[in-house]
């Protein structure tokens, strides 16, 4: 479903297929303690060679779409559609920004959802966000995600439990609220 890896251009950001050239930015993100907390990443591969290998192979996976979020050619994060369930036409969205708070995330999410719903038969895109991440919750609601439920005590971080909020957006919700994506453009 995601065999083609597009470049998507917005006013603030350009989304490009990830590659080894984006490893320095990814390394900055995975080593940032605040980004680790916001994503619930207790530990991860933070070796440049392992990350370069990871990014080099993303183009070979038709079941996911990994895009670098770039502003003025600088890597400022990544956005990913993964966990594809082709039988049920659904997938997961995740985003990590090394430069939050500039509208980059809002535009990146809109670009990737516009692309996904216009070029694939996807019906549902979901995500999980920790309840303490109020900025992300605000953005997800603003772009059209709807809260579905709560996974109670889903994250143990520094001795405290935190809930994960499950959200999704459905094709018909996205299409009816977003200009430029009409029934004629849907697969």
Image (cartoon, rainbow, N blue to C red):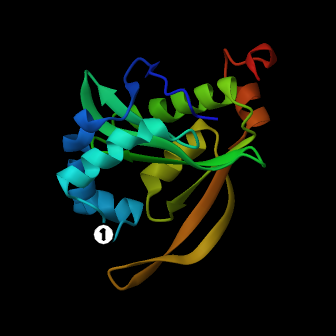
- Is residue 93 among the parts visible in the rendering? yes
Residue at 32% over, 35% down: 19
Measuring from the top left, give residue 142's x and y in whole percent.
57, 39
As drawn, is 171 to the left or to the right of 78? right
- The residue that appears at 28% across and 40% down in the rendered structure is 99
Q: Position of residue 176 (x, y in %)?
A: 76, 26
Residue 50 appears left or right of 79? left
Judge whether 11 appears above or below 131 on screen: above
Residue 103 appears anywhere in the view: no
**Mark 1 crowd level (few <14, some 14–19, many ≥20, 10 Å Cα):** few
**To which quarter of the image does residue 32 belong?**
bottom left
Image quadrant containing the N terminus: top right
**With 116 as the anchor, is 131 left or right in this view?**
left
Quick one: 163 or 9, which is closer to the camera?
A: 9
Secondary structure under badge 1?
loop
Extreme-bottom residue of the structure: 159
In the image, taking residue 69 as reference, residue 122 lies left or right, namely right
Vertical position of residue 10 compared to residue 154: above or below: above
| Residue under the image location 23 percent in, 33 percent down | 21
Q: Is residue 124 above or below residue 34?
A: above
Q: Position of residue 85 (x, y in %)?
A: 69, 50
Q: Quadrant of residue 133?
A: bottom left
Instruction: Looking at the picture, tell me which residue is in the foreground, 120 or 49.
Output: 49
Q: Position of residue 27 (x, y in %)?
A: 22, 50
What residue sits right under mark 1 in the picture? 43
């Amino acid at each position: 479903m995601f065999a083609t890896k597009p470049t998507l251009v917005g006013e603030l950001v350009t989304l490009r297929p990830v590659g080894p050239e984006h490893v320095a930015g990814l390394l900055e993100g995975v080593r940032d303690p605040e980004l680790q907390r916001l994503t619930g990443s207790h530990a991860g591969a933070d070796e440049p060679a392992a990350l370069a290998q990871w990014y080099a192979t993303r183009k070979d996976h038709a079941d996911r779409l990994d895009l670098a979020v770039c502003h003025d050619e600088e890597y400022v994060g990544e956005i990913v559609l993964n966990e594809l369930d082709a039988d049920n036409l659904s997938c997961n969205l995740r985003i990590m920004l090394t430069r939050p708070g500039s509208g980059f995330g809002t535009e990146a999410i809109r670009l990737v959802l516009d692309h996904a719903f216009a070029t694939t038969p996807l019906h549902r895109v979901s995500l999980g966000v920790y309840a303490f991440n109020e900025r992300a919750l605000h953005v997800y609601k603003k772009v059209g995600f709807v809260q579905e439920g709560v996974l109670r005590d889903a994250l143990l971080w520094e001795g405290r439990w935190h809930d994960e909020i499950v959200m999704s957006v459905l094709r018909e919700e996205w299409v009816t609220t977003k200009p430029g994506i009409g029934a004629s453009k849907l697969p």
